[in-house]
Amino acid sequence: MIIGILGLQGDVAEHITYLCLQGIVARVIKKPHELEGIEGLIIPGGESTTISKLLVSSGLLQPIKALIDEGLPVWGTCAGVILLSQEGLLESAPVKATRNAYGAQIHSFIGHGKIAGKITPMVFIRAPKIEWLSPDVEVLSTLDGNIVAARHKNILLTAFHPELTKDCTILDIFLEMIAAQKSKSKSSQIQNTRLQANAL
Ligand code: GLN
């Protein structure tokens, strides 16, 4: 399995290490042709304004949007949440996120919240807050009343940085989403083959 990490700016290296420690092959994506064959994509934390500009200049914006529409599992962390939100450049998830909602860099903190019934360390660095979400978005975790992890169809959002910890709770959720997408496309392939065979 190859997971792409958008490698335009931000904590790309930390995501590579995080995946490699779990034996997952990571591919840094800087150009459109590098998207070929990936089964999931991570939009890392960083500076959402810079990543937005580079998404346009690299020619990656439209191909990534198309892959998301086709069902590619995508996980946005921190700045990635802003980009994937409905007012972000990728406009993929029906959520509204406010940038730097916990304060400046100096207000970075590590919290502990529950995901899938497990207490998980959560690193917040000038993190966004998800202030609004459509009713069909699944809230995966809250901390002190703030939504910090959510999922909408093939999109996973975390306001915090799991890649800066050794905790794999969210990664496991993302891997499950990839596995579900894989079996979905396999069964539609089988169905297509059957339809073609019946037409003969
Ligand atoms: N505050 C940054 C932004 O708005 C995100 C910070 C992060 O990704 N850690 O782009």
Image: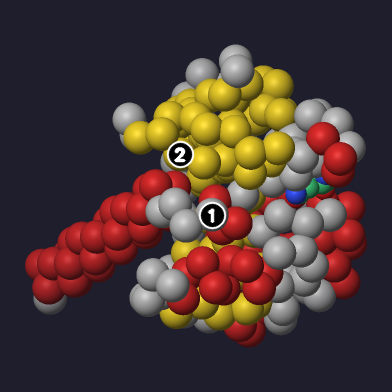
* Location of mark 1 (residue): 165
Q: Identity of the amino acid at label 1?
A: Thr
Residue 160 x/y as whole percent = 63, 42
Q: Which mark is residue 85?
A: none
Q: Residue at x 70, y 37 (%)?
A: 109
Quarter residue 165 falls in? bottom right
User: For residue 120, which numbered disc appears in the image?
Assistant: 2
Q: Is residue 98 above or below residue 184?
A: above
Farthest residue toward the top? 145
Tell me how far mark 2 sits from mark 1, CA to CA: 9 Å
24 or 63: nearer the viewer: 24
Q: Is residue 101 visible?
A: yes
Report crowding for label 2: few under 14, some 14 to 19, many 20 or more residues within 10 A (C-alpha). Answer: many
> Relative to residue 171, is residue 156 drawn left or right?
right
Q: Is residue 110 left or right of residue 178?
A: right
**Mark closest to the chain's N terminus, 2 or 1:** 2
Q: Eyeballing the image, is 23 above or below 143?
A: below
